[in-house]
Amino acid sequence: MITTNSDKLFKESEKHIPGGVNSPVRAGKAVGVNPLIIKRADKGHIFDEDGNELIDFIGSYGPMILGHNNPIVKKEIVKALEDSLSFGAATKKELEMAVLIKELLPSIEMLRMVNSGTEATMSAIRLARGYTKRDKIVKFVGNYHGHGDSLLVQAGSGIATQGISSSSGVPDSIIENTLVLNYNDFEQLEELFKTSGKDIAAVIVELVSGNMGVVPGNFDFMKRLREITKEYGVVLIVDEVMTGFRVSIGGAQKLYKIEGDLICLGKIIGGGMPIGAFGGKKEIMERLSPLGDVYQAGTLSGNPIAMTAGITTLKYLKDNPKVYLYLEELGDRLENGINLLIDKYKIDATVNRVGSMMTLFFTRTKVTNFSEAKTSDEKAFARFYKEMLNLGLFFPPSQYEAFFLSNEHTIKDIDKTISCVEKVFEKMNRLE
């Protein structure tokens, strides 16, 4: 695949932007490639500055569930542009969005819009601390909740790709108030709450992790987590930034039959526009300024263009449940196809999937937590990634990311992907 223009633009970007990218996971260092510079996208495909067309399994890391350039969403955005890009003031669309999200996620009684998933999780943690008057929070190894200071302790995603457990610039005083447990570990959970339960303000968790690769939470573990947080008066923050409206219309909470006290959202509720939100129990949310003593603000929060894109996307998903049936069909076809090839070519790999989120781990170990995810052969993944890229498949450039299906991917796209996987597995098998 020719990438002359992408390479040239990336090298120029390196002079002006740290690492040449505005988010580390895009850099491609983990797989030994320069990032493609993307020009446009349509439906389930993406096009770079060299004119290469690829089947897109990144989907802006989740929000493009209806595919790129969706005509319904695009039409509503164009109409909204006539009224201006931003006001810095309240709009009717903010109310419409709040009512719609509350209808789809009954665990949310009140919510506030922000501009990113990171903003949502940072704000939810501050609110939980203000509400409980406690300082300590609990997170799980490999769960990534954005780049807030207290949340970078043993996170996944780009942090995992770079092989560091935390980030320089995070003070020890913050780390001291962040308690870390292994994902799906009953024994650690019980022991921590016995010793520190009364000091904990909040537990933040992904019911389905997407940032150490796709790793679903154990159902019984999540049920116990909900029980024990209630027992100790600890706020349970469910991070649905990635899974909200992605794994089902009711998010991961619907799949697990669990309701958080606070819920963080992003990705799909913006229909591709920058967005985030957090909400939950009224008695907690009313502690936010201007009603309460917990301050949180954002000039661009509730941006009318983002609201328009998100409302249109959510309404479509609400009115067309067949979208999720189709995504499940695609996901099942791709998962089964890859699994057959893993067995055929005796590749040390395993597939984790929840709905339209999936990860191919290059390990035979069943992946239920971060330490098991880290048994993956990252060099094997890098070889796979480069070969698939050259065949016209666009996956996240990290072993520890999810890839995503959209409503605009076709059976033909899936079958082509499986065919390409076979070519790559056959080649990898010959090289062993």
Image (spheres, grey):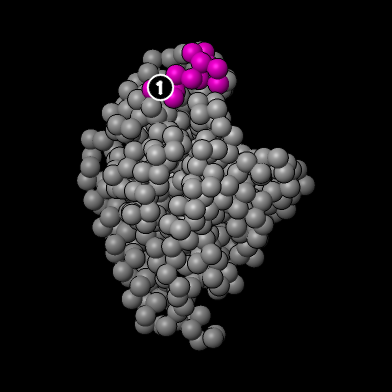
Residue 274 visible in rendering: no
Relative to 93, say whether 222 is above or below: below
Tell me if 19 is positioned left or right of 142 in this view: right
Tell me if 216 is positioned left or right of 11 in this view: left
Q: Is residue 106 magenta?
A: no
Whole-percent x, y for residue 369 in the image: 48, 61
Which SS class for mark 1? helix
Whole-percent x, y for residue 373 in the image: 51, 65
Relative to 135, say whether 58 is above or below: below
Whole-percent x, y for residue 290 in the image: 52, 13
Q: Which residues are magenta?
A: 282-294
Of all residues, the one furthest to the front in this rendering is 194
| Type of amino acid at the residue the image marks with label 1 | Glu
- Give whichever of 400, 392 is nearer the camera: 400
Please identify the quarter of the rendering in which residue 378 is found: bottom right
Whole-percent x, y for residue 71 in the image: 35, 36
- Tell me the residue at 34%/48% (across/down): 223
Per the image, the residue denoted by label 1 is: 283
- Give whichever of 236, 53 is nearer the camera: 236
- Tell me the residue at 51%/80% (across/down): 428
Residue 11 visible in rendering: yes
How many labels sit on residues?
1
Question: Most prominent secondary structure in the magenta stretch?
Answer: loop
- Tell me the residue at 44%/24% (across/down): 284
